[in-house]
Image: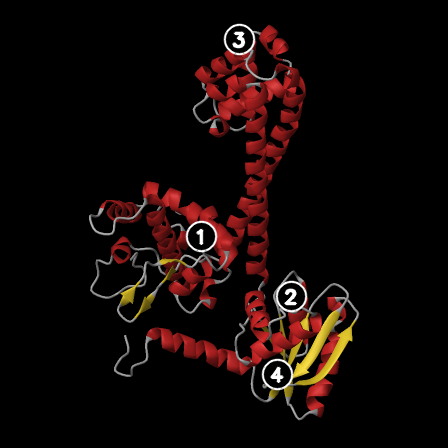
Amino acid sequence: MSHGSGVSRGDRNRNARLARLRAAVPVTNAIVGIDLADRKQMLVVCDHDSRVLARRTFRCKAWDLGAALDWAVGRASGNGFAGVTVACEPTGHRWRILGQLAADRAMSFVCVQPTLSSWARKSEDLTFDKTDDKDAVLIARLTAQLRCYLPEPVDETWGRLRHLGARREQLLDEHVACVQQLRDLLECVWPAVLSAAAHPFKSVTWVAALTVVLRRDGGDLSRTRRLGAARFERRVHAEVTRRGKARPCLRIVRQVFAAASSSAGVLEHRRGALERAEWVLDDCDTARAQQAEVEARMVAVLNELELTDLVTTIPGLSAVGAAAILAQTGDLSRFTSARAVVKHAGLAPRERMSGTFTGKARLTGAGRPPLRTAAWRAVWGCLQTNKVYAARYRHLTTREKNKLKPTQAQTIIAAAILRQLHAVVVHRQAWDAALATGHTTSQGPLMVA
C-alpha cells in the first residue's frame, strides 16, 4: 500500500532502518574500522569518503583495546570530528568484547557482515588481496555507505536463552551422531536386533533391552541366552522403569532375546563392537539427560520472560519448540516486521522478475541456518495438532494449479510459524485461528498466507 505517496511499506521500513543507521554513523563522526584477531588488532580512522586519517596496529588481546579506542578518539578529534563510530565484523566472540568497550565510552558501535566484506574485497581490484590493513579500510568504507547493521542489544535474560539454545543444538547433534554410530555398529555385528522393533531407537523398551545386553553381559550374547527369557524380561522391566516408563512391550523384549541366538553379522568383531556400542549408548543417554535439563532451563527462561502461556497458544508448538526458535532470533521486537524474521531464517522467497519475464521463485537460503532448522522442527508437531496448518498443508499439496511438493509446503508452514510467533510475542496477543486463516474483515497480523 502506497497511501497515494508512491512509497511502499518496504520503502518506509528501509527508510526507517537507514535513519537508525545514520544516527549511529553521523557525518560528524569519524569511522574506526577494526580487523579483529587474537593478538593483533588493526585499526584505521577514516572519514566518510573512506580516506584514511590514521592507522595503527595494536598487539594485544581484544579486552585491551580500550587504549586503542582512546587513541582513535584523539586522532578523530585532531581532524575535526566530534566523535567516532566503531565498526568491525561479527566473527567469533571478540566483537562482543569490542562492543562492550565502545558502550563503556558512549561510542556508537555497528557491525559489517563478513559476506559484504568479501564481496567488497573482490570488487576492490583484480588481485583479491586479503590483508588486515585492507580489511580494516573495507569495514570503514562499508560503514560509511551504511552497509552495516546495529547488533542486538545486550540483555542478560535473552542472552542466557541464546546460550542454552546453542547448548541444546550441540546435544542434539551429539545424540544423532551416537544413534547413527550405534546403528552402524549393530548392522555390522548384530543386525538381527535392529528388526526387533519397527523404530528401535525411538522405542524405550528396545533401548532398555539393549542396555541390559550391553551393560550386564558386555556384548557376550551367550551369557544373555543363559540368563533365560523370564529373567531377561524382569531385568528389562526394571530398566524401563528406571527410564521413566510403566512397563515394557513384551513383544519387543522377546524379539530382542530371540535375536541373541542369531549368527548373522561379522562374528569376529562382535565382542569388540558391542563393547564399543556400550560406550556409545552411555554417551547417548548422557546427551539425552543433559538435553532434558537444558530444555527445562529454557522453559524456565521463557517463564521469566512471561512468554510461555502466549507461545503455547499456537496449537502444536510446545514451549521447548518456541524457546528453541526464540533462542535463535533473540527478542522478536527488534525486527521491524514478521517478514524480517522469515528473511532472517532464509525462508523468504527470492523473486525473479524483469519486464514481462517472471522466473520461478526460490528460497533465498541466506540468513541463520539454526533458526531455519528450529522452525522446520516445529512444523512436524504443528501439522499433527494444528487444524489451520494442516488444512493449509493439504491445500498446498492437493490444489490443481501450482501444486507443491510436501517439503515445499512444509517450508511455507515453517515461515508461517515464524510470522505468527512474531505477532504473538510482539503484540502480546494470543494466537487466533480466525486470524490465522484470514477469516476477518481486517488484515490481522496472524495470517498464514
In the rendered image, residue 213, in percent from the top left (x then y), is placed at 60, 17
Residue 123's quadrant in the figure? bottom right
Residue nearest the viewer, comparing 302 with 402: 402
The kind of residue on which mark 1 rests is Thr
The kind of residue on which mark 2 rests is Arg
> Can you identify the residue that label 3 sits on?
230
The CA span between labels 4 and 3 is 81 Å
Q: What SS does tag 4 mark?
A: loop
Residue nearest the viewer, comparing 340 with 100: 340
Q: Mark 3 or 2 closer to N-term?
A: 2
> Can you identify the residue that label 2 sits on?
96
The CA span between labels 3 and 2 is 60 Å
**Residue at the (59%, 48%) spot, across then down:** 167
In the rendered image, residue 263, in percent from the top left (x then y), is placed at 56, 11
The CA span between labels 1 and 2 is 29 Å
Q: Mark 1 or 3 closer to N-term?
A: 3
In the rendered image, residue 118, in percent from the top left (x then y), is placed at 58, 67
Mark 3 Cα shell of 10 Å, populated few (<14), some (14-19), many (≥20) = few
In front: mark 4 or mark 1? 4
The kind of residue on which mark 3 rests is Ala
Mark 4 Cα shell of 10 Å, populated few (<14), some (14-19), many (≥20) = many
**Residue at the (48%, 25%) spot, across then down:** 200
In the rendered image, residue 442, in percent from the top left (x then y), is placed at 23, 66
> Can you identify the residue that label 1 sits on?
308
Report the disc number at residue 380.
none
Mark 2 Cα shell of 10 Å, populated few (<14), some (14-19), many (≥20) = some
Q: Is residue 308 left or right of residue 269?
A: left
